[in-house]
Image (cartoon, grey):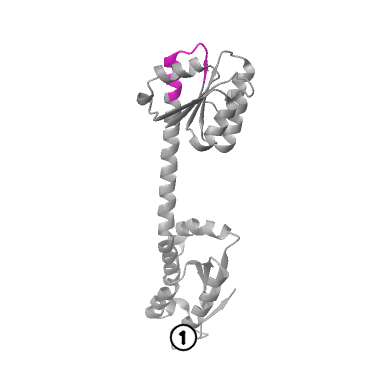
Amino acid sequence: MKILIVDDEISTRNGLKKYIHWDMLGIDEIQDVGNAFDAIDLSKTYQPDIILSDICMPGMDGIQLCRQLRQHQPNCRIIFLSGYSEKEYLKAAIALSAVSYVEKPIEIPEVEHAIKAAVEQCLQEQNQKRELENINQTLINSLSLIKNRVVSTLISSRNTDAVEHDLKLLDNLFQKKEDFYLVIIFKLKNESAHWQQEDSNIKSSLAGVLSAFEHIITYKDSRHLISIISCDNAADLKSHGRAISAINQAFASESIDSDGMY
């Protein structure tokens, strides 16, 4: 954890650095400056997790400082120091979601309590972010498996309840307006044939063909199977288009036709 102390009184900054038990609070790095302008410049590279700032300072006060810092570091925790308990200062501190508002003269235990609370908030946020990243990565790693499972289930069974959860996971992929999509239509040649009656070898072969693509979802009725395939760019569309010919050749001797459209 990194903290930045901002106070125009050097004695206050030195006292805080000397008497607060930083190691016990989980603070690894400490920097201090005497005005808001230096704080803004330093924060660009230092990127503190916690700001411990006086409110009343010449040039730019602590409220104005933290409003600016929040634009670039929205998750930075703020602790205000002030010799005044004016209502407007308190309102501003609340609006900035400050962790604490410590009045001067400073009591070291009170400041340590505020810093401890700020550190705990930072750690909690880091853990939540890490958990979310792990969940997202797990989902990304599972997308191909989920897509293949959706297609295989819809090909082999009338019951689509089993894939409802998978479809919800994939639903957000359709919200990318910049994506390209290709639709492949599989149609049974025999007018009297029914998809559910087709040989299991054909179904297995078709599932194998579709698994080669990053397909999104497949619909079907008694004689048609429609697969919607996601492409990252136009070049992929052409590549998939060539694959359509390969699919036609693969099923030339079977009772299935395939066609594609952009």
Is 115 placed left or right of 94 in the picture? left
Specify the segment rendered in magenta.
101-115
Q: Is residue 181 visible?
A: yes
Question: In the rendered view, would you say 194 is above or below 113?
Answer: below
Residue assigned mark 1: 249
| Image location (x, y in percent) of residue 35 | 57, 24
Q: Residues within 10 Å of mark 1 (few under 14, many from 20)?
A: few
Q: Is residue 225 visible?
A: no
Residue 153, located in which quarter of the rendered image?
A: bottom left
Q: Amino acid at mark 1?
A: Gln
Secondary element under disc 1, as helix, strand or loop, is helix
Q: Residue at coordinates 51% horizontally, 37% vertically from top-left?
A: 45
Q: Residue at coordinates 48% horizontally, 56% vertically from top-left?
A: 169
Decide whether residue 10 is among the magenta residues: no
Foreground pick, 2 / 89: 2
Foreground pick, 32 / 101: 32
Foreground pick, 66 / 252: 66
